[in-house]
Image (cartoon, rainbow, N blue to C red):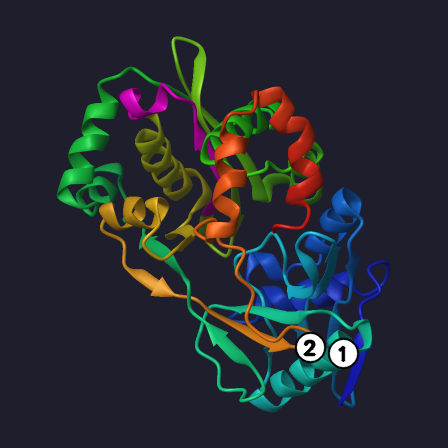
Amino acid sequence: MQIHQLNQNSDSKAWDDYVDNHQEGSFFHLSGWMRVIAKTYQHKSHYIYATNKDNQIIGLLPLVEQKSFLFGHTLVSTPFCVYGGAIADSPEVQTKLEDEAIEIAKKLNVDHLELRYKSEQNNPKFLTKDTHCYFTYDLEDSDDKILAGVKKKQRAVIRQSLKESLETDFNASTKMVHDVYAESVRNLGTPVFPAKYFENLKQEFGERCELMTVAKEGKIASAVMSFYYKQQVLPYYGGGLFEARALKSNDLMYYALMCHAQQNKNCTNFDFGRSKNDSGSFKYKKHWGMEAIPLHYQYYLVKSSKLPNLSPNNPKYQMFIKMWQKLPVKVSQFLGPFLSKYLG
């Protein structure tokens, strides 16, 4: 077995073919993320893969280095993504890739190494942190059946939203979606990603990246950027303006996306992404009747003496959040990208 560093100019196809054909290969393991992150944020990538004696890939692990005065120096698989970690043909290959990641982390002298696994792991070298869950929903073969599978109270909210004569557009521009998303995260007190990040995602992933808006009489109230992979739709960056609550436009947006993905994209699963345990978004997703499935993020401490805590619930960030919520949207859009590049 040999370990190699990915050369995106020559090895990307073989890398992506392996992800496509591996049961645990996710959209976030694709090599395109390396190009998007480098193009948007200039973070250095350390994508590694293992080969057998026939030079065939038998495992891989995407890694990205982030270095910030405020938020520390980390090596992550993968920032801006909810899933990551090594995928391999065998536990032995996975362990070999993880050991190589540890050596890279030590050489870089980072604070910690973070591997974002969905499933439980058993490598004793790592510490586990289970502070987030993810949510999925199997899509039935008709709009009525999809709606019937939603929890009763949420189903009533969706039916109410259907009476609002809301307009959906699945061919929105990145600017339309980013403008709504920027205001939405500002209201939550979170720095927004730059508009060019959305543009780079769309350019890199093409039809696998879709932009949707929901409007009332031509005025957009909600918007979301979604990814499509392996018959699954992943609404990833979404939000709503102040009026979205009264219109129930977010609720319509996710239901309409489910129906659209099933009918037009042959999707069989809706991945509602991760949420911090007991947060507002966690409770919202539970309200749909989806099961909360724990994520098992793995950490190897290099310079740090304890696990990181970048949660908005961390008391030391509360004053910052309250201040950020009061910023004009345009100011938050200007300042946000300088901070969010380290918060993925």
Residue placed furthest toward the top = 217
Which residue is label 2 attached to? 302
The amino acid sitting under disc 1 is Lys
Q: Name the residue under label 1.
A: 106
Residue 88 place in picture, x, y as percent: 61, 79
Vertical position of residue 302 compared to residue 139: above or below: below
Q: Report the side of 89 relative to 319 (left or right).
A: right
SS class of the residue under badge 2?
loop
Whether residue 169 appears in this view of the structure is no
| Residues packed near mark 1 inside 10 Å, few (<14), some (14 to 19) or many (20 plus) | some
Residue 121 in the image, given as x and y percentages of width and height? 48, 81
Q: Where is residue 226 in the image (x, y as percent from the top left)?
A: 51, 41
Viewer-closest of 136 and 275: 275
Labelled pair 1, 2 in contact (Cβ < 8 Å): yes
* Three-letter residue code for mark 2: Val
Q: Using the rendered view, name the quadrant where residue 90 is placed.
A: bottom right
Whether residue 91 is visible to the viewer of this picture, yes or no, is: yes
Residue found 38% across the figure and 53% down from its top: 269
Residue drawn at (46%, 51%) of the image: 315
**Part of the protein shown in magenta:** 234-248
